[in-house]
Image (cartoon, rainbow, N blue to C red):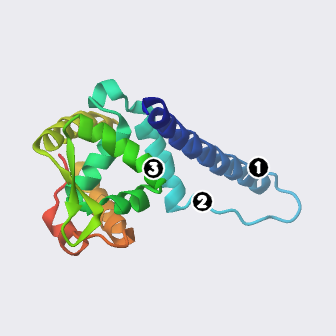
Amino acid sequence: MDRHCCNYDRLLCDDLYQWYNGAVMEQERCRQRDGDGGGERERCYTPGSMVLLTRLAKQVYRRTSEELLGMPLRHLMTLSYLRDHDGAPQQELAEAFCMDANNVVLLLNELEDLGQIARRRDPADRRRHRVELTAAGRAALAGAERAQESIEHEVLGALDPEERATLWRLLTRALYGSEAASPTAAGAESELTPAR
């Protein structure tokens, strides 16, 4: 179980790294074509928002460690999602994380063994489980997020506090807008505040 989940983190980072390298190599080819001064000039584009977000995420992944956070990154992502979507159906997690349902069960088993989440039968549909964050899960998440602030400070060091708050608001709005069935999407931006 641990080995599979560790591989998931590694595969995620490897995929992001390959995508990032492909984008960087394409940009370099564009610069070379644009700079050679000869022949027909192809139009090249600057990196789009998704490429920039991926590159920024890579910087975060590179600086993040289980020792620093006090938990694996996959646990932080799951607990964070559950804080914003407490009581979410287990299937929603599979969709939100683009993971196979069996892998979500393994991930939730780890968190349940740590006492950080609880799965309860949905009273409206006994076949479904709803996942809730426990007090221990909230405490573990708070500690990991405090540790993550140092990483965020380093990665976003070129931005002043006002720019960071604006970035946070825009990312939050984009995230909630892209989540198909977010129970908190309607008031998320006004209810949540960025970490300082």
Mark 3, residue position: 102
Q: Position of residue 64 (x, y in %)?
A: 38, 32
Q: Is residue 5 left or right of residue 82?
A: right
Mark 1, residue position: 32
Q: Amino acid at mark 3?
A: Asn
Q: Which label was assigned to residue 136?
A: none
Q: Amino acid at mark 1?
A: Gln
Q: Position of residue 53 (x, y in %)?
A: 46, 53
Q: Is residue 155 visible?
A: no
Q: CA distance from mark 3 to mark 2?
A: 39 Å
Q: Amino acid at mark 2?
A: Thr
Question: Which element is circle 3 on?
Answer: helix
Q: Where is residue 37, by image quadrant?
A: bottom right
Q: Is residue 15 left or right of residue 84?
A: right
Q: Nearer the viewer, mark 2 or mark 1?
A: 2
Question: Which element is circle 1 on?
Answer: helix
Q: Position of residue 159 (x, y in %)?
A: 32, 48
Which residue does the image show at 32% across and 41% down from the upper left?
A: 109
Q: Nearer the viewer, residue 80 or 126?
A: 126
- Mark 2 or 1 closer to N-term? 1
Q: Is residue 3 visible?
A: yes
